[in-house]
Image (tube, rainbow, N blue to C red):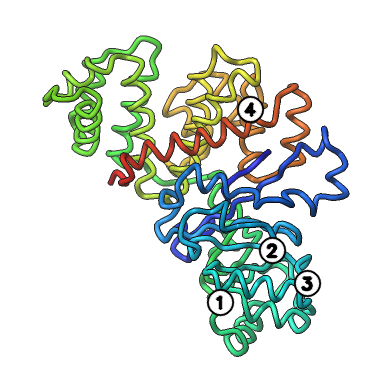
């Protein structure tokens, strides 16, 4: 099984929901699903187990998650699969759920149970035909390239005033800026927030320069603990975070100095903590999704190291994933950003021009998080890897991220 989280943003680039896209089988080892894909997950709703494993409260502030259902799985026993409050789950379907009595009655029942509903892949000419379904849904996902939002806004406000509109395939920053300026959409989905920085004249702020200095210290093959502690001491947020973490790890230790805390952790654990903590701080002025992408890629790459025959390079792969959005963190083109943090040639080769032994791992990460299941399936065949190992690695990465930011169920600020 495959599954990934796709963010939906508001007009302020804040994540307001996630869509979970999943596929049950590898399409290359199970070619029959290419013709019967609509039956995939007939007995259950794929993706709900991701919500359950993560805990829906850790996904978004307003706790809304879109999960795909098809024309068969929509009739499954969703209540037994989803244990949280029903209004936190949005059941997303397409035009294969037709405006016939059977489906309309099922949608009414799901709506009465508290679930929210969303429809996608509906063309303008189908609006009238699907009015019995449109009157029930909470969201309509529209391809902004195929529809005039000014007209659609008038249409929906007049006939379906309670429906929220979601723009999909927003794949450039220019598109996002134009759409948010024009108004009409409530949420936006696409690759615009992950686009590489091509050029920038911005100077790196003094605070970020300090963080870069710290990254360079700890990523030296044999860094000095005292030197790292000295840099940490200049940042209150890092000091508080480090002391809190070490005191949680060592009950009643009463550690009160950065030097003592660094010594307690040791080189390996201090390096790991600094890389993750500094990444969080570097992203503090960016959309929160940048932090999530960076850290989940890092952990996912680390766990995939044995799958790609790189078990001895797991720490390097962690850094590659972590720095895969360093251009966005520093507002610099990738080449310039990596020159500042001085990573290995294997990492820079993968991130700058897709070369070297780590490049296939990065290519796989980006295909997986984009729900490009055909490409994921192809690559798994090439490396002779099991689907389940990859899926378990991804969900483990989500859980790791949850635990990193949500200690005991409470988000670290």
Could you tell me residue 166's position as x and y percent? 59, 68
- Sequence-wise first label, 1 or 4: 1
Picture quadrant where residue 361 is located: top right
Which residue shows up at 33% across the image and 34% down it? 277
Q: What separation in Å lies between label 1 and label 4 (alpha carbons)?
A: 42 Å
Q: What separation in Å lies between label 3 and label 2 (alpha carbons)?
A: 10 Å
Which residue shows up at 63% across the image and 27% down it? 389
Task: Find out whether the residues at labels 3 and 1 contact each other: C-beta distance under 8 Å.
Answer: no
Location of mark 2 (residue): 93
Q: What separation in Å lies between label 3 and label 1 (alpha carbons)?
A: 26 Å
- Sequence-wise first label, 4 or 3: 3
Location of mark 1 (residue): 184
- Sequence-wise first label, 1 or 2: 2
The reply to whether residue 257 is visible in this rendering is yes
**Which type of secondary structure does the marked residue at label 3 adopt?**
loop
Q: What separation in Å lies between label 1 and label 2 (alpha carbons)?
A: 22 Å
Could you tell me residue 286's position as x and y percent? 41, 50
Q: What separation in Å lies between label 4 and label 3 (alpha carbons)?
A: 36 Å
User: What is the number of the mark on residue 389?
Assistant: 4
Which residue shows up at 32% across the image and 13% down it? 223
Could you tell me residue 31's position as x and y percent? 86, 39
Location of mark 3 (residue): 98
Instruction: Tell me: 292 left or right of 285.
Output: right
Q: Nearer the viewer, residue 112 or 53?
A: 112
Please tell me how crowded label 3 is: few (under 14), some (14-19), or many (20+) other residues with Cα within 10 Å: some
């Amino acid at each position: 099984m495959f599954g990934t989280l796709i963010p939906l943003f508001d007009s302020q680039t804040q994540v307001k929901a996630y869509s979970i896209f999943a596929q049950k089988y590898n399409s290359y080892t199970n070619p029959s699903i290419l013709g019967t894909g609509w039956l995939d997950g007939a007995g259950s709703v794929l993706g709900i187990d991701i919500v359950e494993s993560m805990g829906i409260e850790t996904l978004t502030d307003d706790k809304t998650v879109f999960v795909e259902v098809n024309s068969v799985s929509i009739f499954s026993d969703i209540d037994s699969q989803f244990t949280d409050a029903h209004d936190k789950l949005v059941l997303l379907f397409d035009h294969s759920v037709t405006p016939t009595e059977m489906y309309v009655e099922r949608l009414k029942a799901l709506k009465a149970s508290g679930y929210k509903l969303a429809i996608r892949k509906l063309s303008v000419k189908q609006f009238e035909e699907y009015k019995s379904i449109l009157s029930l849904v909470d969201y309509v996902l529209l391809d902004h390239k195929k529809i005039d939002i000014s007209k659609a806004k008038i249409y929906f406000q007049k006939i379906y005033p309670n429906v929220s509109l979601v723009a999909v395939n927003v794949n450039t920053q220019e598109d996002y800026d134009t759409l948010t300026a024009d108004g009409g959409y409530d949420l936006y989905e696409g690759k615009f927030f992950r686009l590489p920085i091509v050029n920038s004249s911005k100077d790196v702020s003094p605070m970020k320069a300090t963080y870069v200095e710290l990254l360079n210290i700890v990523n030296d093959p044999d860094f000095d603990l005292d030197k790292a502690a000295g840099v940490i001491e200049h940042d209150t947020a890092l000091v508080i975070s480090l002391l809190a973490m070490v005191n949680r790890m060592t009950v009643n230790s009463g550690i009160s100095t950065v030097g003592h805390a660094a010594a307690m952790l040791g080189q390996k654990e201090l390096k790991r903590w600094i890389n993750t903590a500094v990444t969080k701080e570097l992203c503090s002025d960016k959309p929160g999704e940048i932090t999530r992408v960076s850290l989940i890629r890092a952990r996912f790459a680390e766990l995939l190291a044995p799958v790609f025959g790189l078990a001895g390079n797991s720490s390097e792969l962690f850094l590659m994933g972590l720095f895969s959005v360093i251009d966005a963190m520093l507002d610099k083109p990738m080449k310039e950003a990596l020159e500042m943090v001085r990573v290995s040639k294997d990492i820079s080769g993968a991130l700058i021009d897709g070369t070297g032994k780590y490049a296939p791992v990065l290519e796989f990460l980006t295909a997986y998080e984009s729900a490009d299941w055909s490409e994921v399936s192809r690559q798994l065949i090439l490396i002779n890897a099991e689907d389940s190992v990859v899926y378990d690695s991804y969900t483990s990465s989500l859980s790791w991220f949850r635990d990193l930011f949500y200690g005991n169920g409470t988000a670290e600020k």
